[in-house]
Image (tube, grey):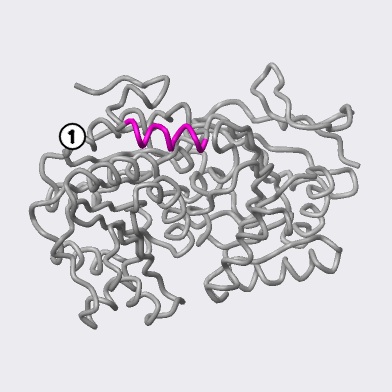
Amino acid sequence: MMPTPANNFSGLGIAPGILDVLNKHKFFQPTPIQSQSIPIALSGQDLVGIAQTGTGKTLAFGIPMIQNLLQNKGMGLVVLPTRELALQVEEAIRQIGISFGIRTAVLIGGASMGRQISDIHRNPNIIIGTPGRIIDHLNQRTLSFSGVKILVLDEADRMLDMGFAPQLKRILQHVPVQRQTLLFSATMPPDIIKIAQTFMHLPTQIEIAPPGTAAATVTQEGFIVSREQKAQLLHKLLDDYRGSVLVFTRTKFGAKKIVRHLRDARHSAAELHSNRTLGQRKEALEGFKTGRYRILVATDIASRGIDVVNIEVVINYDLPPQAEDYVHRIGRTGRAGTTGHAVSFITPDQQGDLRNLERFLKKSLPLGKLPDSMPAPPPSLARTGFGGQRPFQPRFHGPRKPFTGHHRSGGGGFPRRRWK
């Protein structure tokens, strides 16, 4: 029987000591994925949890893992796709587990192998790592998974998208057959189903939101804009939104170029992509969290794994290559119960990409009107809307009151603005 959502953590079977730590850190009300996953995971069952990014999946597996290891000993293993996500998960688990002497080790590329080997020799209770670096340790025989009692595959669909399927299969062959496996993913492609059928024992499946569902707390809009106009529109949006801004590009070169332009315009900005060293990536993320950088420009390496609340707006400077990545990108705003906004730049030759995105979202993306100083979208992009509906009329036109912050209109909750 599927558990019903709980109003607080106390009814989920969590030990009193862990509840005290949750209260201390002001975790009072579980998210839907937490309230449904935690009781099942605490019971020792295998679990497949499907939920959009930013819904609290880390505590959904972190709390049961800590409690089960305290009760039954053994080791926990968390495998995830990116360095940033590994560091984020380790921080969350350490925050809860440190009061109980839980030791963690993070195995990620770009960090010292010697330091990681030293951490392994300290017999950590939980190992958190990316597939490539975990395989490196297995190859060098510096790591054994014979004591693993709980295995977590976090952001499993992303790992498969990044080509980690061979490494995942090898890792799964090194962990004991008698174990608990918790798999969390934002989508449920066939490869995930195959993993569940092959490597899990009668898992319970929980789906909080169907694939393609964007967070309800995030409002969305798009602009038809030429490539040459993108930089100008970005600067106008940065004038309009005064909070923290996350900008996504397709390429590392594009991210670097945008940051250079932003700094020339005296904006505080940092870049995050795979060409940056681990130290540079950590510095960029920490600077973005603390406000040293108002703007973070990133490739899709950051579409999952940035746990920063109160990002005011996400700007898709380039549309993502896959429609699924759009949901993950905009899920960086509107987190932890806050509201957020997402803006996408769409070039005239991306009409097909826009249609694919709307088909995936099952709704039209509202189009905004460009500022008066910029030419209007080409007439060739007049459209019929999703599913053959009547032509879509942009909602943002005509005189408006000055934009003073996020507020919802009666017709759908999209912010109103007046270009300066």
Viewer-proximal residue, 415 or 273?
Answer: 273
Local crowd size for mark 1, using a 10 Å CA cut-off: few (<14), some (14–19), many (≥20): few
Q: In the drawing, does residue 323 fall left or right of residue 364?
A: left
Determine whether the residue tagged by mark 1 lies in a helix, strand or loop.
loop
Q: In the drawing, does residue 36 fall left or right of residue 324?
A: left
Q: Is residue 127 above or below residue 137?
A: above
Q: How many marks?
A: 1
Q: Quadrant of residue 271?
A: bottom right
Q: Position of residue 48 (x, y in %)?
A: 25, 41
Q: Pointer 1: what residue? A: 43
Q: Amino acid at mark 1?
A: Ser
Q: Residue at x 67, y 19 (%)?
A: 411
Q: Is residue 404 above or below residue 134?
A: above
Q: Is residue 293 magenta?
A: no
Viewer-proximal residue, 5 or 381?
Answer: 5
Q: Looking at the image, which residue sits at the far left? A: 178
Q: In the drawing, does residue 37 fall left or right of residue 274?
A: left
Q: Residue at x 73, y 62 (%)?
A: 269
Q: Residue at x 78, y 39 (%)?
A: 369
Q: Which residues are magenta?
A: 16-25
Q: Residue at x 30, y 66 (%)?
A: 164
Q: Is residue 22 magenta?
A: yes
Q: Is residue 282 above or below residue 333?
A: below
Viewer-proximal residue, 129 or 387?
Answer: 129
Q: Which image quarter holds the N terminus?
A: top left
Magenta stretch secondary structure, dominant: helix
Q: Position of residue 366 (x, y in %)?
A: 65, 34
Q: Which image quarter holds the C terminus?
A: top right
Q: Position of residue 354 (x, y in %)?
A: 56, 46
Q: Position of residue 286 (x, y in %)?
A: 62, 60
Q: Is residue 172 above or below residue 44?
A: below
